[in-house]
Image: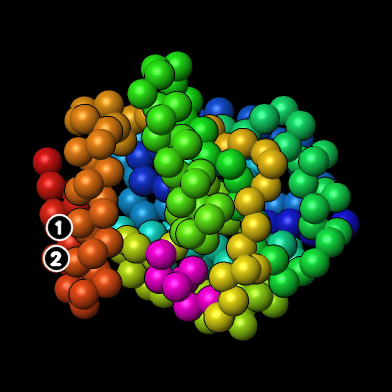
Amino acid sequence: MSKISIIIPTINEANNLPLLLSDLSIIKKEGEISIIDCGSEDKTIDIANIYGAKVYKSKERNRGLQLDIGAKNSKGDWLIFLHADTRLTHDWFAKIKSVLKEDNNYIYYFKFKINDKKIIYRVLEILVNFRSKYFKQPYGDQGLIIHRSIYLKNNGFRKIPLMEDVDFLRRLKNKKDLKQLNLPIFTSSRKWERTNIFLQALKNWNFRRRWLKGESTKSIYSDYYKK
């Protein structure tokens, strides 16, 4: 199998990163792991070094830029973009190997799961997976697996602080090339814990609507991360 490059943007992820890097350690010499950090003040970079990941630094808190830095410095034929607060199953690599031997033109993403037992999250999982599969609208927290040639053909991630996943996928000419894996990725529930999940979903929809109407990402970013 062609070598893979796993690209993870970080900012103060010392609590989550060890868990993900432990899940990823199974790849051993068949791939590389790159952490692109944008100014962590905790032990994020120390943890990355302990696990043998490559570390790159971004001068801006800009996820699109971080992902692009990771892609440009990668060596693998397949690029796997993951968020730091996700977990994978113990057999994820064994299952993904056969998939990556198939058509290079597909962009794959994982089946969305939330790492929390509350019933309300099962409803959100159903809605997200339905949107992703039938409306071809997966997001970055579901993991994106892209062959290098397709990434470059579509000009990669733009250097924008958010909506970089939506922006990239909107530029694809053929949405049929998006394919959901029968393999879960477990996302942290932290983004929904401080608010009603449906209210948060509505807020996220409004942020996307504003972006699609042409509002600046700087303005949306400010509201998105408002305390």
The label on residue 3 is none
Looking at this view, is 198 or 33 the one in front?
Answer: 198
Q: Is residue 74 above or below residue 174?
A: above
In what quadrant of the picture does the C terminus appear?
top left
Would you name the residue on which mark 2 appears? 219
Would you name the residue on which mark 1 appears? 222
Looking at the picture, how far across and down is residue 163, in whole percent? 34, 63
Looking at the picture, how far across and down is residue 58, in whole percent? 40, 62
Task: State which region is magenta.
Answer: 166-172
Amino acid at dot 1: Ser
Using the rendered view, name the quadrant where residue 50 is placed. top right
Looking at this view, is 148 or 144 the one in front?
Answer: 144
Rendered residue at 62%/68% (across/down)? 176
Q: Secondary structure at mark 2?
A: helix
Looking at this view, is 22 or 80 the one in front?
Answer: 80
Rendered residue at 31%/35% (across/down)? 191
Instruction: Tell me, yes or no, whether the two marked residues, 1 and 2, touch with CB atoms within 8 Å.
Output: yes
Rendered residue at 27%/26% (across/down)? 193
Q: Is residue 210 above or below residue 17?
A: below
Q: Is residue 138 visible?
A: no
Question: How many other residues sit within 10 Å of disc 2, few (<14), some (14-19) or many (≥20)?
Answer: few
